[in-house]
Image (cartoon, helix red, strand yellow):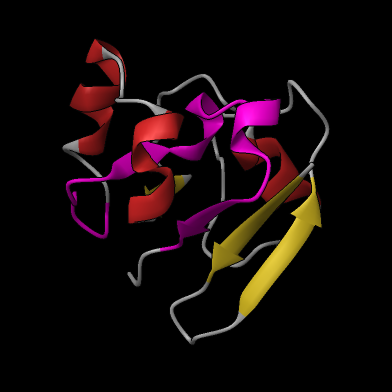
Amino acid sequence: MQATWELPDGRKITLDVAEGMNLMQAAVARGIPGVVGECGGSMSCATCHVVVTPDWAERAGPPGPFEEDMLDITEAGRQPASRLSCQIRMTADLDGIVVQVPAV
């Protein structure tokens, strides 16, 4: 399965992501710029903020209540399709997902 990160400079990086792995883990493991994951995925830092592209927003689902709170403190500012990438787990339904890394 694959996921693509669109970077603020226009580059696109596509990675293979194992089923069940979250997008933050995949991004940090491969050094995707702008995805830090300081808390390791415990949803306490918001440094893995991404914006799910319109074609994928519904399939990725809405943020949960605690994630909603964390999205309010993102450095880049919240957008309608903002998510914490540590909360997006790769499934067959998300194969091909595209997310944007917001400019800070």
Above-or-below relation of 38 to 36: above
Q: Is residue 47 visible?
A: no
Left or right of 66 on screen, residue 85: right
Left or right of 43 on screen, residue 71: left
Residue plotted at (34% across, 34% down): 58
Span colored in magenta: 75-101
Residue plotted at (59% across, 83% down): 11
Q: Looking at the picture, how far across and down is residue 35, in whole percent?
A: 55, 54
The quarter of the displayed image where residue 37 is located: top right
Q: Quadrant of the N terminus?
A: top right
Q: Looking at the picture, how far across and down is residue 39, in whole percent?
A: 54, 30
Name the residue furthest top.
65
Above-or-below relation of 17 to 87: below
The quarter of the displayed image where residue 59 is located: top left
Q: Looking at the picture, how far across and down is residue 46, in whole percent?
A: 38, 38
Above-or-below relation of 68 to 55: above
Q: Nearer the viewer, residue 63 or 104?
A: 63
Residue plotted at (48% across, 44% down): 48
Q: Quadrant of the C terminus?
A: bottom left
